[in-house]
Image (cartoon, grey):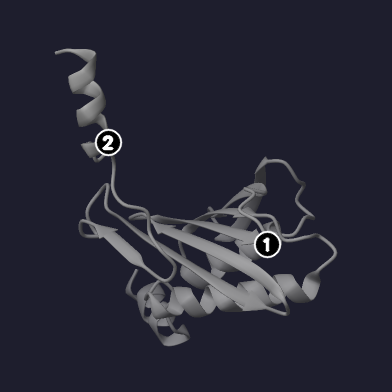
């Protein structure tokens, strides 16, 4: 193959899948099967601040990214319930400490969803009202996607075990 052929063919290549636009959800397989995932992206304008959200739902965990006025990654936290008493533990994976914005949000998301949470967040530490508003919007979206059950659902699943 000549280099001329390569140049003419290269723009026609489709690598990967198209990017998601605002408010779109893309699923890959059944969430009950291993390896399946669902990606949701959306943007909200809260208190004159643009918040970008990305939710990636795996079979047994959720990855969430919250960006404030930028697409910067921010601090990364991992949260999960621990045995034997089902308390939630949170650790900082990249940047930040346990008292930063995001660690408490990750803890509450584990309690609300019952799933492991990996949360990347770049909301400013001195903006508790913005953090609360972002968490409300995120939980609203998670409920709409069916990731957050009602108290009755949680009670029925805990008594079934």
Q: Is residue 118 above or below residue 144?
A: above
Secondary structure type for disc 2: helix
Say whether residue 61 is visible.
yes
Residue 114's spot in the image, x, y percent?
47, 66
The picture quadrant where one finds residue 65 is: bottom right
Q: Residue at x 24, y 59 (%)?
A: 32
Residue at x-position 47% and y-position 84%: 151
Residue 153 position in % (x across, y down)? 38, 82
Relative depth, front residue between 30 and 10: 10
**Residue 85 seen in render:** no
Q: Quadrant of the N terminus?
A: top left
Q: Which residue is mark 1?
A: 68
Crowding around mark 1 (Cα neighbors within 10 Å: few <14, some 14 to 19, many 20+) is: many
Q: Which residue is mark 2?
A: 11
Disc number lying in front (2 or 1)? 2
SS category of the residue bearing label 1: strand
Kindly identify the residue that appears in the image at 27 percent across and 52 percent down. Answer: 36
């Amino acid at each position: 193959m000549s280099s001329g052929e390569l140049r003419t063919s290269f723009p026609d290549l489709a690598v990967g899948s198209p990017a998601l636009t605002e408010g779109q959800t893309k699923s890959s397989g059944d969430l009950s099967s291993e390896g399946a995932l669902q990606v949701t992206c959306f943007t909200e304008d809260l208190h004159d601040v643009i918040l970008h959200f990305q939710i990636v739902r795996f079979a047994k965990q959720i990855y969430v990214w919250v960006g404030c006025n930028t697409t910067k990654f921010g601090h990364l936290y991992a949260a999960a319930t621990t045995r034997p008493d089902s308390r939630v533990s949170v650790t900082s994976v990249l940047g930040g400490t346990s008292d930063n914005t995001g660690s408490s949000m990750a803890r509450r998301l584990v309690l609300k969803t019952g799933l492991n949470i990996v949360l990347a967040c770049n909301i400013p530490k001195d903006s508790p009202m913005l953090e609360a508003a972002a968490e409300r919007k995120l939980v609203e979206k998670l409920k709409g996607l069916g990731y957050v059950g009602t108290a009755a659902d949680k009670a029925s699943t805990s008594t079934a075990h």
